Image (cartoon, rainbow, N blue to C red):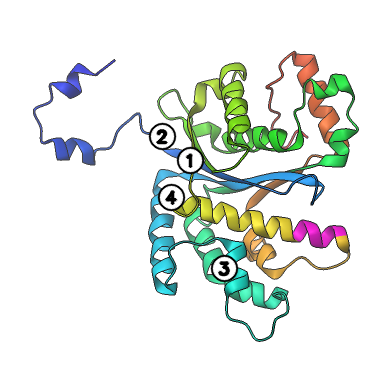
Amino acid sequence: MFSSSLCDDSRDPLALLAEGNPLEPMIHVTLDDVGNCGKDGMAAVVGYVAYKEQWEAFNWAWKKTLADFGLEYLHTSNYIYRYPRVGDHPPTDEELFKILDPWIDIVYLYLLKPGTGLGICVIVPCADYEQLTAKEKQFVREPALTAFELAVGFACWHVKGDLSALNGMAVQMDETQNACSLYERYQFLKNENQTLKKYLSAIAFTDDKRHWPVQAADMLGHLTLRTWRQYQADPTREWPGAFTKLVFPEGSRTVASRVFGLDRLRRLARLRMELQDKAAIPDDKAL
């Protein structure tokens, strides 16, 4: 269980720590769940997958910017509506862009621009899920759980070239009332999915007030939900500028987004039926 070479090493313990722990996860995906069937007609899981070095640089920049603005943490919805504005109208797209621009820059510069990090967004419309047959629902869980399963799977696909038995991917999730159900799905994926069982290393449910990566996922979640609601109300209206900059900075797509409507849900169910694998995750381009 313990390495005798490490236990017997006579070097300075601080020097050993500086070398890093080879069993420490070097890849982390941080996720947040947004939307609900009753109010929004969909459930989504969004977030970012990146490497340890990227997250460390991001944490430094996020912490510094919080200090510059005199904030203890960033909760996007609260921050937007408490931000000083003229008038009592809801924030306009222009105001939203101005308010969130510094935070979007941090995500882009430290997580996405290096070219290895990626945003994840999986949306499952509830009305489409309800049209599945009883048999199909044996292979596809309710929208919030399906979105979580696929978000974890897509994150693994993105970094699969660097995953190994000694370098797995850790999952960090915002604390939620759905934590018990999500943990059950995580355990199911880890035990039943032939790929994920080798590479998932840990899951933690974290307080977004104390965990900066979750605050970034919360921002992506807020803008995703805002854009979804706007699109449902008026499909012809342009997307909010803040969402566009976060998802399409400089014309490049930085978020792997999938809406799992009825056709994709049925293809997912059929794939799992054919494989007799209720935990199968398709390639992020297959569906």
Label 1 with label 4: CB-CB less than 8 Å: yes
Provide residue 171's location: percent of width, then percent of height: 51, 37
- The residue most toward the bottom is 86
Nearer the N terminus, badge 1 or badge 4? 1
- Marks 1 and 2, Cα distance to the nearest angstrom? 7 Å
Q: Position of residue 176 (x, y in %)?
A: 59, 42
Q: Is residue 53 magenta?
A: no
User: Quick one: which residue is furthest to the top in this view?
Assistant: 276
Looking at the picture, does residue 270 appear above or below residue 176? above
Type of amino acid at the residue the image marks with label 1? His
Q: CA distance from mark 1 to mark 3?
A: 26 Å
Task: Name the residue tied to disc 3.
Answer: 79
Residue at image x 60%, y 76%?
98
The crowd level at tag 4 (other Cα within 10 Å; few <14, some 14-19, many 20+) is many
| Amino acid marked by disc 3 | Tyr
The tag on residue 28 is: 1
Which residue does the numbered mark 4 point to in the structure image? 55
- Label 2, label 3: how far apart the Cα atoms are: 32 Å
Q: Quadrant of the N terminus?
A: top left
Mark identifier at residue 257: none
Residue found 48% across the figure and 48% down from its top? 207
